[in-house]
């Protein structure tokens, strides 16, 4: 018999229901703590895991008490925290990469358009019942004709590029190698980052988490952007030097910024970012959307069938 | 000598500067009231007019005192108010249609994404310094897979359709005849409006002003939309029955709406729309963008050259 464990939040306990009906020959165990799964670790073949529930302690237990475990599937697209905590060497790790692409790309565009079209001012003016047309129309911008730089060019980055182009922007995308599919006008390797940033009106960040000692986008990088540029980050807070960003908002070099991710989350109530003029603080919402759960469940169902058949799994993470 | 009058707001007095340099043979007169232009009406060949400064009184003066006047160019895309006030029969009327298409389409998408991605809640939460991730992520939506209906399919409507499709929506567009260029998956005549609305998740309105006695989109029309649909209006307030909209927000049939236009503007401070849950009030901002003035000035320069050459003018309004 094959045994599949689910280490997920209680709100996701239903995730195995469809699988149980399709695979009566498989044992499915669902819990929100590794302690509850511990008695079954010795016979467990695969683990489906909500990334926030994975920890060094879970990794140790899997190494020491799960000798049969060959596959681990995350519910998240990013696996940087899993890799940081470590995992047994024999495991095949698969992610949910792609499942969150649509909402993250939508959220990135929502934040960019919030900056260009003054949506926070609209919301705050509405709360005060103020028809502030004269003040609110000052400075409204359009994306048509803008030059954009897209840092990170996986599923999400390509989705953002497709959206930006429909608004009339031209986009230089940046990934590790400068190679790959996609419709950006230019694709550069990260070694040519400066060429992508010079004169860009829009900087979009959707980089995976890295163990880098310093952020890829620092003050000198921001200085390359066009005067009045805006910055949107929906990737990882560690990619962007927030202090350098704030300096350039205050100097007027940057017209605005919107952050969905931060170096330390949640942002503390006394963090000065909350009240920085021109800065939108979005509390790490981008990955949420009404189609995500169905896409992850379809992926798990497909990968489970592949696992049972001995076929290659989708979304395998190269370590 | 040719005489061209400009009836524009004082902030736009520079609009004739480039033309003066290019056409030393033409007399240019710029004012913000028809009284200031009145002494020159007798020799005026053309009038460039900011639509809000046009009135029945201006129309009367043009009829009675401007016998040479052959061309009138508006700075606005919509000319419904000009046609309502009337104008001399011999005039060729040209609009700035197309000049506002990019910002209006951007604004429509900004409002749609504000509804789908909870941007007003993000802004209000930020003002309270609240990391309200758990409550704010509930109900976030993605455009991918949505069915949209686009009412109005001119420059702006086609721009909105192109943007919606880049997000993964499929779009049924509606115009008067059901004929015309564009990339919508379906294009229907307004006589088949119901077919466009049935089951749509997103209703976008960008209809020109009409003399119709009742709004095209009324309660029964809204009832055809999918449960949980959203409505965005960037055209004219008279196209949408606001009371019927509010009823359907309260019943839960509609999940949200965003209005940039209203039957009576500005909205009064005690208008209940300001505080209607799920409704975004945008104070008629959509047409504003940083590229609009340059596009209008290029259009006027081109049309002036055509006028002087006796060629056909661009953006001629069929009456």
Image (cartoon, coloured by chain):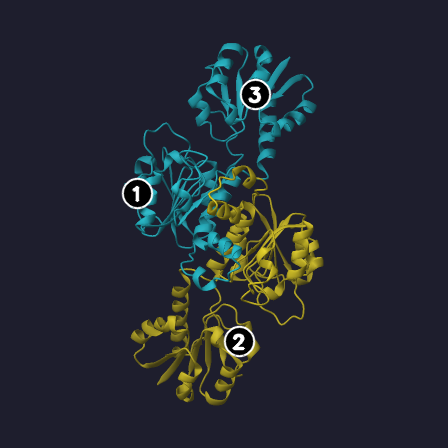
Chain colours: A yellow, B cyan
Mark 3 secondary-structure assignment: loop
Instruction: Determine the CA span between mark 2 and mark 1.
Output: 49 Å
Q: Nearer the viewer, residue B221 or A178?
A: B221
What secondary structure is marked by label 1? helix
Q: Nearer the viewer, mark 2 or mark 1?
A: 2
Residue A38: % across, % down: 42, 86
Secondary structure of the residue carrying tag 2 is helix
Q: Which residue is mark 2?
A: A82
Q: Within 10 angstroms of label 1, few (less than 14), some, or many (20 or more) residues?
A: some
Residue at the spot of label 1: B195
Chain for disc number 2? A
For the residues bearing labels 2 and 3, Cβ distance under 8 angstroms: no
Which quarter of the image is occupied by the C terminus of chain B?
top left
**Upstream in the sequence, badge 1 or badge 3?**
3
Q: Quadrant of residue B43?
A: top right
* Mark 3 crowdedness (10 Å alpha carbons): few <14, some 14-19, many ≥20: some
The answer to which quarter of the image holds residue A142 is top right
Residue B313 visible (yes or no): no
A308 relative to B39 in the view: left or right: left
> Where B65 falls versus B261 (above or below)?
above
Q: Is residue A206 among what the camera can see?
A: yes
Q: What residue is shown with label 3?
A: B33
């Amino acid at each position: 018999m094959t045994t599949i464990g689910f280490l997920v939040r209680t709100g996701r306990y239903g995730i195995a229901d469809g699988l149980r009906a399709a695979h009566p020959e498989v044992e499915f165990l669902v819990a929100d703590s590794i302690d509850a799964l511990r008695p079954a670790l010795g016979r467990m073949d695969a683990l489906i895991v909500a990334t926030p529930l994975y920890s060094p302690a879970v990794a140790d237990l899997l190494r020491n008490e799960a000798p049969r475990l060959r596959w681990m599937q995350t519910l998240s697209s990013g696996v940087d925290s899993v890799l940081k905590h470590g995992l047994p060497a024999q495991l095949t790790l698969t992610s949910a990469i792609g499942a969150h692409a649509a909402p993250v790309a939508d959220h990135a565009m929502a934040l960019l358009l919030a900056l260009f079209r003054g949506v926070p001012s609209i919301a705050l003016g509405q709360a005060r019942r103020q028809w502030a047309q004269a003040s609110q129309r000052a400075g409204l911008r359009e994306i048509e004709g803008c030059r954009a730089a897209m840092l990170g060019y996986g599923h999400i980055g390509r989705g953002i590029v497709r959206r930006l182009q429909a608004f009339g922007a031209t986009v230089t995308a940046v990934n590790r190698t400068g190679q790959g599919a996609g419709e950006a006008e230019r694709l550069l390797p990260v070694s040519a980052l400066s060429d992508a940033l010079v004169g860009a009106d829009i900087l979009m960040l959707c980089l995976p988490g890295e163990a880098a000692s310093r952020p890829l986008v620092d003050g000198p990088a921001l200085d390359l952007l066009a005067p009045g540029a805006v910055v949107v980050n929906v990737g990882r807070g560690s990619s962007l030097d927030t202090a350098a960003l704030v300096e350039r908002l205050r100097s007027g070099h940057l017209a605005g910024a919107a952050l969905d991710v931060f170096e330390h989350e949640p942002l503390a109530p006394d963090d000065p970012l909350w009240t920085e003029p021109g800065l939108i603080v979005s509390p790490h919402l981008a990955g949420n959307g009404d189609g995500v759960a169905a896409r992850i469940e379809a992926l798990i169902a497909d990968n489970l069938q592949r696992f049972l058949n001995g076929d290659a799994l989708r979304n395998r993470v190269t370590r």
